[in-house]
């Protein structure tokens, strides 16, 4: 009789242990999904912050806007050229980062517009195309996104 009682108690303990482990696993899965979503949102926010920083520079120096949003070619004047190419490097960093985040975080599904933004920037900014074509390994995600980049 004692063996039967002990067996029942042991079985009940095993079932309760399995149920508790299942509940913990479900909660862990829920927390993981939540944390992944928060991480993706943070990464998207970081990529947008990078762009806002560049846009702030353009706001303060509106003479450079046409090089990035209106297709104006890279200037020949050395000082202007260096400034435009520096901004182009910053843009390329931001675009590459956004593409990297999008490829790494599946929770960024609603970030699909980033591809369109990158395509638009490359179409309208010869300076960005120039810097990426000169050093494609510096911006691997951007280079893979648009492998036929030419200045």
Image (cartoon, grey):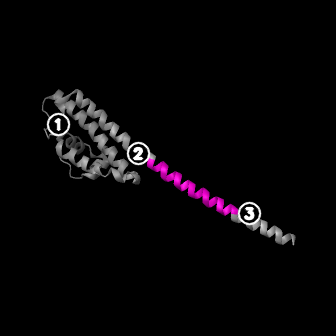
Start-end of magenta stretch: 16-37
The secondary structure type at the circle numbered 2 is helix
Quarter-wise, where is residue 56 in the image?
Answer: top left
Viewer-side residue, 93 vs 60? 60
Q: Evaluate whether residue 151 shows in this view.
A: no
Secondary structure under tag 3 reads helix
Residue in front for this viewpoint, 25 or 90? 25
> Is 28 part of what is drawn in magenta?
yes
* Residue nearer the viewer, 53 or 147: 53
State the image coordinates of residue 19 (x, y, percent, origin top left): 65, 62
Pick the front one: 145 or 148: 145
On screen, residue 8 above or below 106? below
Q: Residues within 10 Å of mark 2 (few under 14, many from 20)?
A: some
Q: Earlier in the sequence, mark 1 or mark 2?
A: 2
Where residue 38 sits: x, y (%)?
45, 46
User: Residue drawn at (69%, 65%), measured in percent from left and top?
Assistant: 15
Q: Which residue is mark 1?
A: 67
Q: Residue 116 at x, y = what percent?
A: 25, 50
Residue 40 versus residue 55 in the image, above or below: below
Report the Cα–Cα distance between label 2 and label 3: 42 Å
Where is mark 3, residue-wise?
13
Q: Which residue does the image show at 21% across and 27% down from the upper left?
A: 61
* Residue at the (30%, 46%) spot, across then down: 137
Q: Which residue is mark 2?
A: 41
Residue 10 location in percent, x, y?
77, 66
Q: What is the CA distance from the residue labelled 1 to the residue labelled 2?
A: 30 Å
Going from N to C along the chain, the mark reached first, 2 or 3, is: 3
């Amino acid at each position: 009789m004692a063996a039967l009682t002990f067996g029942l108690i042991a079985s009940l303990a095993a079932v309760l242990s399995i149920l508790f482990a299942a509940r913990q696993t479900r909660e862990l899965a829920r927390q993981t999904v939540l944390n992944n979503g928060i991480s993706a949102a943070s990464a998207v926010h970081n990529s947008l912050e990078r762009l806002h920083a560049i846009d702030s520079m353009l706001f303060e120096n509106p003479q450079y806007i046409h090089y990035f949003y209106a297709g104006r070619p890279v200037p020949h004047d050395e000082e202007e050229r260096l400034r435009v190419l520096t901004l182009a490097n910053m843009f390329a960093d931001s675009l590459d980062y956004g593409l990297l985040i999008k490829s790494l975080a599946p929770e960024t599904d609603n970030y699909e517009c980033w591809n369109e933004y990158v395509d638009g920037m490359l179409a309208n900014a010869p300076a960005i195309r120039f810097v990426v074509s000169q050093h494609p390994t510096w911006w691997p995600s951007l280079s893979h996104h648009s492998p036929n980049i030419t200045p």
